[in-house]
Image (cartoon, grey):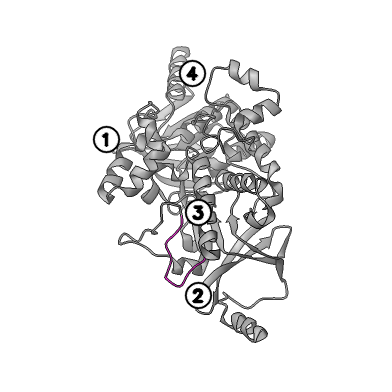
């Protein structure tokens, strides 16, 4: 009877396609959760799980694993500008807001690197971006046993047992052997694949055109090949755009750098104490339970804390540079405000970029060697990442995913397996959805939800 039941389970299992000879089963472990993507969000979850497991016996531990397509940990490497600082306090690291006593804190990292006193003497809350990235790598190395790198998830298949979808089969491709795929089983998945660079419709990366996420390696390649850069154009009005303008201006001392944006001027980021409370953990609760129209109002009121805004120090620095160049009679830094790019004609040796000054309609053609799109990022749709699992998820009247307070996507009645999201939930959880501010707290909430669900299922 047992053999018959097991055979029926296999017959009832829902697959996206038949297993092939190069598809291998991972371990026989049924994971409590498999994380898809391993940036700061799922790293924080891995730490929360690691710390929970360290306190308990084998039977009470959370079986967790994480899959990352990169060969090693990396976070916005293309924008690790040497002197750029973080825009959030170091106390909003991977753990402190959840557990100030954790050994994974930024302060513990500093102590281990023998820089704690030196950092305190800087009298700042905002570490260098390269330093914070090193902190993230340090933390990731400590939970390395939970992560499989070079593992790109290519499918998530729901598995049905007696009419109920009880778990998922997560299929990943081995980057070192693209013909080999591995299948792992999990009762829950936690999707944290981050955002993808956004380019205007019809635009693609090329030798002379690229997104700001590739800034540092592209500039290095241009300098290494001694490619002449006489004029560089940056499109965008946010922090990344301003940083690109400053970086290009410093790295190509003979080039003109043009900043093109539709605003009249850069908008300062609102990091005042009261506005910053929109990122408090309590604000997530208020936002989540508010009516839809209140959510939209809060989002609109506080866009200036994060979207298309620039740190005032950088604005003042760029303005000072422009004035000094005017005094010296050699202006390399140009602000083409209230202006849009209308067309781009790629020539063998240059880009002819047509720009329009919006108030008058006057047009100008800029002969440029480089065009950088600092046009932001966008979340990938769940269907792009999870395929048929997307069909199991419920949506509201605006076609947005229904997400519970514990960051779990609402699913059809016959689904007991769970899908958690870290990111892509601004419509339900507010501005912190894609930011570091609540990463530590959110990781703890997801860990506690996993424990509560397991207790209900076993109890």
Residue 401, image x, y percentages: 39, 59
Q: Distance of mark 4 from mark 3, alpha carbons?
A: 60 Å
Q: Which residue is mark 4?
A: 330
Q: Nearer the viewer, residue 284 or 56?
A: 56
Mark 3: secondary structure: helix
Find out whether residue 287 is within the magenta segment. no
Q: Indicate which disc residue 46 carries.
A: none
Tag 1–tag 4 contact (CB < 8 Å): no
Q: Nearer the viewer, residue 412 or 346?
A: 412
**In the picture, which quadrant includes the N terminus?**
bottom right
Q: Distance of mark 1 from mark 4, alpha carbons?
A: 27 Å
Q: Which residue is mark 2?
A: 164
**Point 39% across, 31% down: residue:** 276
Residue 350, image x, y percentages: 54, 41
Please say if 179 is above or below 278. below
Is residue 276 visible from the viewing direction of this image? yes
Q: Which residue is mark 1?
A: 359
Q: Indicate which disc residue 449 carries.
A: 3
**Disc on the earlier residue, 2 or 3:** 2
Q: Nearer the viewer, mark 1 or mark 3?
A: 3
Q: Nearer the viewer, residue 223 or 272?
A: 272
């Amino acid at each position: 009877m047992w053999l018959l039941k097991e055979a029926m389970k296999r017959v009832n299992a829902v697959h996206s396609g038949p297993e092939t000879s190069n598809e291998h089963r991972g371990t026989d472990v049924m994971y409590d959760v498999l994380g898809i993507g391993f940036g700061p969000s799922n790293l924080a979850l891995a730490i929360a799980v690691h710390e929970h497991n360290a306190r308990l016996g084998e039977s009470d531990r959370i079986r967790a694993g994480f899959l990352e397509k990169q060969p090693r940990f990396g976070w916005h490497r293309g924008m690790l500008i040497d002197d750029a600082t973080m825009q959030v306090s170091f106390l909003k690291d991977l753990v402190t807001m959840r557990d100030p006593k954790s050994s994974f804190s930024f302060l513990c990292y500093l102590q281990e690197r023998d820089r704690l006193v030196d950092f305190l003497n800087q009298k700042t809350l905002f570490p260098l971006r390269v330093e914070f990235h090193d902190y993230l790598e340090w933390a990731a190395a400590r939970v390395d046993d939970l992560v499989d790198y070079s593992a790109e998830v290519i499918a998530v298949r729901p598995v049905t047992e007696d009419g109920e979808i009880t778990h998922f089969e997560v299929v990943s491709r081995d980057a070192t052997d693209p013909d080999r795929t591995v299948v792992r089983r999990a009762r829950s998945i936690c999707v944290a694949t981050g955002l993808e660079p956004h380019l205007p419709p019809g635009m693609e990366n090329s030798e002379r055109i690229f997104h700001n996420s590739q800034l540092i390696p592209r500039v290095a390649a241009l300098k290494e090949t001694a490619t002449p850069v006489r004029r560089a154009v940056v499109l965008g009005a946010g922090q990344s755009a301003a940083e690109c303008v400053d970086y290009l201006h410093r790295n190509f001392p003979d080039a003109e750098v043009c900043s093109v944006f539709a605003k009249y001027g850069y908008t300062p980021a609102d990091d005042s104490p009261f506005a910053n409370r929109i990122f408090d953990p309590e604000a997530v609760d208020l936002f989540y339970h508010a009516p839809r129209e209140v959510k939209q109002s809060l989002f609109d009121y506080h866009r200036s804390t994060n979207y298309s805004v620039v740190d005032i120090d950088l604005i003042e620095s760029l303005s000072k540079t422009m004035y000094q160049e005017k005094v010296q009679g050699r202006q390399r830094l140009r602000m083409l405000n209230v202006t849009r790019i209308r067309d781009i004609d790629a020539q063998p040796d240059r880009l002819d970029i047509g720009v329009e000054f919006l108030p008058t309609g006057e047009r100008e053609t800029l002969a440029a060697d480089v065009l950088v799109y600092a046009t932001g990022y966008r979340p990938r749709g769940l269907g792009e990442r999870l395929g048929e699992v997307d069909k199991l998820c419920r949506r509201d009247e605006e076609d947005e995913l229904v997400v519970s307070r514990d960051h779990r996507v609402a699913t059809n009645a016959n689904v007991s397996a769970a899908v958690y999201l870290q990111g892509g939930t601004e419509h339900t959880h507010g501005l912190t959805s894609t930011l570091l501010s609540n990463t530590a707290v959110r990781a703890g909430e997801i860990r506690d939800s996993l424990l509560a669900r397991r207790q209900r299922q076993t109890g």
